[in-house]
């Protein structure tokens, strides 16, 4: 082939078929790799339709983290002439030569491709860096569509609690981790690996719920809490815990967290965020006496069977609701309890 692209590549075999992994400069992705024509109907495409709303976020991720970003491999098919020439003494490492007239169509990773192209417009220096591309010989539309299904059907996005735990760039997530670490009850009863706790879980809170509540508190009350100095948020949650006997009982192993989740409202995310919302209002209104008003938490009937208070607020047809409306309505009931406590 006189007019060709050449890549250093590794040859592998899956299901009896050869495939190749090449390192491709980012600046060549737009020219070398096509995506499905958007005017084609779904039955003639090998990819989902491009969601343009996702592209700016990927581009920002690359430009904002140019010294530490990481990208997983793209997958593409080669429709046209190509040849693999092993290096001397090698069987699986060599040069992959692809005819310039061949079409290389992205099967998996079109949003990463588009995000990279967008990022290069503002940070062209990234263009000489590379991304791995797994290349499969084209075997027709049906095979390419099946490849898309196979590549995507077992991918599972990490749960929010785990993403927040591992994300070192998110300042609010770092603050929430510092808060949990500073409060023994939270440290012992928080599940970092699940966002929705199973019915028999020995944990009382999910980290994602505590994070949402802490972020709401800090934002709404304008608290100067940081991961390095979480004390303003820690002080609030410690004061709340003093007025939540059931939480303390769970910490002493006198009641099972599973029982509290089954029987009470305060063991769910809607209550955590509502407490934070009403607590932030309290801090703003009574900056010097807000702790005294938190005693109102003790006078609330938190039972899920207390339908007169919770149905239409934290409950919808008997099931716990986490909508924004539910949080606000629950926060209003808690605020009334704070006002009553203050006399």
Image (tube, grey):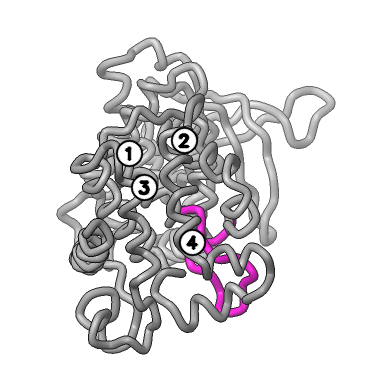
Is residue 30 at all visible to an observer of this figure? Answer: no
Q: Residue furthest right?
A: 89
Q: Nearer the viewer, residue 199 or 242?
A: 242
What kind of element bears circle 3? helix
211 lies above or below 261: above
Whole-angstrom CA distance, mark 2 to mark 4, is 18 Å
Residue 206: in magenta span: yes
Q: Residue at x 19, y 51 (%)?
A: 38
In primary-sequence order, the first of circles 4 and 1 is: 4
Residue at the disc numbered 3:
291
* Nearest to viewer (mark 4 / mark 3): 3
Q: Residue furthest front?
A: 343
Whole-angstrom CA distance, mark 2 to mark 1, is 10 Å
Callout 1 touching callout 3 (CB < 8 Å):
no
Magenta stretch: dominant secondary structure: loop
In primary-sequence order, the first of circles 2 and 1 is: 2
Q: Residue at x 28, y 74 (%)?
A: 314
Q: Tell me where residue 301 appears, x and y as whole percent.
A: 35, 78
10 Å crowding of disc 4: few (<14), some (14-19), many (20+): some
Residue at the disc numbered 4:
195
In primary-sequence order, the first of circles 1 and 3 is: 1
What kind of element bears circle 1? helix
Residue at the disc numbered 1:
218
Classify the position of the C terminus by image quarter.
Answer: bottom left
**Residue 170 in the figure: left or right of residue 96:** left
In primary-sequence order, the first of circles 2 and 4 is: 2
The part of the chain drawn in magenta is 193-208
Q: Tell me where residue 180 appears, x and y as whole percent.
A: 55, 45
Q: Residue at x 56, y 27 (%)?
A: 23
Whole-angstrom CA distance, mark 1 to mark 3, is 16 Å
């Amino acid at each position: 082939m006189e007019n060709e692209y050449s890549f250093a590549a590794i040859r592998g075999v899956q299901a009896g078929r050869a495939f190749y992994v090449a390192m491709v400069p980012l600046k060549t992705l737009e020219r070398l790799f096509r995506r499905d024509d958007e005017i084609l109907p779904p039955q003639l495409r090998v990819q989902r339709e491009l969601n343009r709303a996702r592209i700016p976020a990927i581009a920002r991720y690359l430009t904002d983290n140019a010294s530490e970003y990481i990208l997983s491999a793209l997958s593409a098919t080669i429709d046209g002439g190509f040849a693999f020439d092993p290096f001397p003494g090698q069987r699986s490492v060599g040069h992959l030569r692809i005819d310039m007239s061949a079409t290389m169509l992205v099967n998996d990773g079109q949003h990463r491709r588009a995000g990279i192209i967008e990022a290069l417009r503002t940070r062209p220096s990234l263009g000489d860096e590379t991304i791995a591309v797994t290349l499969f010989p084209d075997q027709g539309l049906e095979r390419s569509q099946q490849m898309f299904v196979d590549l995507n059907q077992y991918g599972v996005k990490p749960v929010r609690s785990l993403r927040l735990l591992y994300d070192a760039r998110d300042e609010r997530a770092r603050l929430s981790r510092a808060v949990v670490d500073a409060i023994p009850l939270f440290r012992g009863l928080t599940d970092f690996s699940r966002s929705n706790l199973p019915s028999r879980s020995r944990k009382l809170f999910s980290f994602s719920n505590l994070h949402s509540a802490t972020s709401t508190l800090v934002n709404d009350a304008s608290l100067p809490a940081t991961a390095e100095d979480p004390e303003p948020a820690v002080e609030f949650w410690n004061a709340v815990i003093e007025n939540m006997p059931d939480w303390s009982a769970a910490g002493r192993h006198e009641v099972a967290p599973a029982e509290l989740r089954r029987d009470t409202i305060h063991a769910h995310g809607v209550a955590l965020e509502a407490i934070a919302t009403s607590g932030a209002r309290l801090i703003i209104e009574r900056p010097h006496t807000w702790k005294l008003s938190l005693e109102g938490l003790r006078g609330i009937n938190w039972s899920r069977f207390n339908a007169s208070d919770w149905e239409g607020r934290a409950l919808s047809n008997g099931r716990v609701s986490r909508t924004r409306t539910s949080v606000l309505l629950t926060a209003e009931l808690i605020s009334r309890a704070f006002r009553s406590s203050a006399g």
